[in-house]
Structures are given as structure tokens and as C-alpha cells.
Amino acid sequence: MVKRTPVAVLGVIVAAAALAGCQHQQTLEEARALCTKQGGFLVVFYTQKVTMSGVGPAVASPGNCITSSKFDMAAPSSAPPASDPSVSAAGAPAPGKPATPAN
């Protein structure tokens, strides 16, 4: 059995966190190809540095992939009860409608 000291465990956690920051950033072309393969449209952000000496070149960065599934609306879990059109929101009869007698 291998004994694990708290220092060794902490070292593994720190190493994993350091490597997590070293992920490959997708290029615009890679992101566009992947998004098109999924049947979506890629949002592209254009940025420019503005300095006292002028405006720098426009740099395109990939954003989110927008697909039709992002617009699918799920049915609400509990639908509100159907309202009676002859009764207003306050519970009084709507204007022009006669009051219904209580039984």
C-alpha cells in the first residue's frame, strides 16, 4: 500500500491546476470548422487596441457556436391554470360582462 502524505496530495493538485491553464486555444478556423460541422454559426469577436499612437490591427477571436437547439424552448414544468376570459385579473367580471351568480 502506498502512503500519501498531505504534501504529496497538495503537490498533485497544484500540478493539475497549473496544467489546466495550458490548454490549446482553438484558432478561428478550427472553431469555425467544428461549429459548421455541428450545423451552427460561429460568433466572432473583433478587437483592436487603441493607444495614443493610433488604432492597432483588428484581431478576430472565436466566440460561441450558435445552433438551432439553443432556441428550443422546453415546456414549463408546471403550466399556469387556464384563465376564464370573462373574469379580469382582480377577480371581478370583465367590463361589459354580467356577473355570474354564486350558487
Image: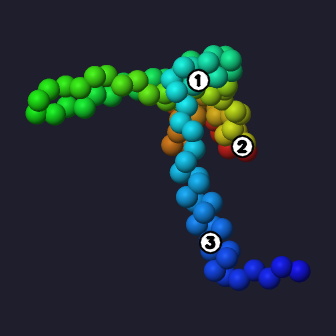
Q: Is residue 41 left or right of residue 80?
A: left
The residue wearing badge 1 is: 30
Foreground label between 2 and 3:
3
Sequence-first disc among 2 and 1: 1
Mark pair 2, 1: CA separation: 42 Å
Vertical relation: 36 (above or below) 63: above
Viewer-proximal residue among 41 and 10: 10
Q: Residues within 10 Å of mark 3 (few under 14, many from 20)?
A: few
Mark pair 2, 3: CA separation: 49 Å
Sequence-first disc among 2 and 3: 3
Number of marks in picture: 3
Q: Quadrant of residue 45?
A: top left
Q: Is residue 5 left or right of residue 98?
A: right
Q: Is residue 77 left or right of residue 41?
A: right
Question: Which residue type carries mark 2?
Answer: Ser
Vertical relation: 68 (above or below) 89: above
Q: Quadrant of residue 1?
A: bottom right
Viewer-proximal residue among 50 and 82: 50
User: Dot 2: what SS?
Assistant: loop
The residue wearing badge 2 is: 78
Question: Which residue is at a point 69% across and 38% down the rendered structure image?
Answer: 76
Vertical relation: 98 (above or below) 3: above
Viewer-proximal residue among 82 and 61: 61
